[in-house]
Amino acid sequence: MQTKRRPIVAGNWKMNTTLGEGRDLAAALCRPLDALGGVEAVLCPPFISLAAIRETLAGASVSLGAQNCHYEPKGAFTGEVSPVMLADLGCRYVILGHSERRAHLGETDALVNRKVRAALAHGLTPIVCVGEDLAQQDAGQTEGVVASQVQAALEHLSGDDVAGMVIAYEPLWAIGTGRPASAEQAGATIGVIRRIVAGVAGEGPAGAVRLQYGGSVTPDNAPELFGQPEIDGALVGGASLKVTDFIAICTAAHMGAG
Ligand code: 13P
């Protein structure tokens, strides 16, 4: 597990920002994030803004990501967006299996795995979200829950596929609550996830896969989180909509990488 991993901080804008608001946000972030060479910054706006934001980010090293995709490349799936369309739009990443989709839209581990394989087949890098809810945490089930989610997400993948992926540990009780996991807690569970990946895909891919923490990340807690050796970045919700906060979080990752 000696591989040097480039930190990755992704902003999940969720169902926020109109087209104009998204453009303004991306324009304000673009240059400051571009200057942070040591960290990969990713913006994940709503589908409708992807094309415009690709234009805003043109020439900068900031990556574009989507928040979901379908598992089929095209067809009669009204209202869905395919991985082919996202790749064509210039997306490099796609968030899959976010807990909000698992909870509100019934996404299962099997569906998430299907989407992961489709995304990879079309040149997208999945950011797969896993994490336990409060009751599971209170019952001491965190490791078991994340193990089964990670194992299911990685089914039928090659070692190379796994090595290139991103997995985000987002405990549900920390999302949007202002109550983040402590750095030690997050680092420990993310260490467990790396061992689970090693068990599924081998030591090489486990040393290369990038593992993020997500859940109430702010400029205040980011430096401590990024100080954990197993944490390779963050998946940021609310704070990614605030220009100074998101730049500060990416800067903390940049410093941690130095
Ligand atoms: P918050 O940063 O708002 O807690 O959201 C985290 C998240 O769900 C990112 O995907």
Image: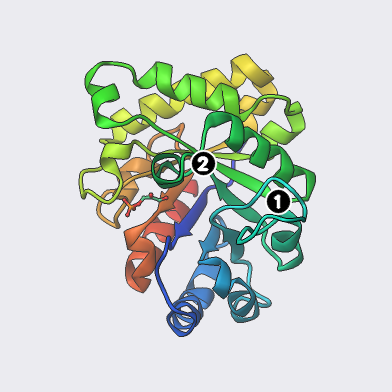
Front one among 190 and 222: 190
**Could you tell me residue 204's position as x and y percent?**
69, 24
Front one among 205 and 24: 24
Residue found at x 69% / y 45%: 71
Q: Earlier in the sequence, mark 2 or mark 1?
A: 2
Q: Indicate whether 174 appears above or below 186.
A: below
Q: Three-letter amino acid code at disc 1?
A: Leu
Front one among 177 and 78: 78
Q: Which residue is mark 2?
A: 97
Residue 124 image label: 1
- Dot 1, how many residues are within 10 Å of its Cα: few (below 14), some (14-19), or many (20+)? many
Residue 110 image label: none
**Could you tell me residue 214's position as x and y percent?**
38, 45
Distance from disc 2 to disc 1, alpha carbons, whole Å, reads 15 Å
Q: Are marks 2 and 1 in contact (CB under 8 Å)?
A: no
Residue found at x 43% / y 29%: 190
Front one among 148 and 252: 148
- The answer to whether mark 1 is within 8 Å of ligand 1 is no
Q: Dot 1: what SS?
A: loop
Q: Dot 2: what SS?
A: loop
Nearer the viewer's eye, disc 2 or disc 1?
Answer: 2
Q: Three-letter amino acid code at disc 2?
A: Gly
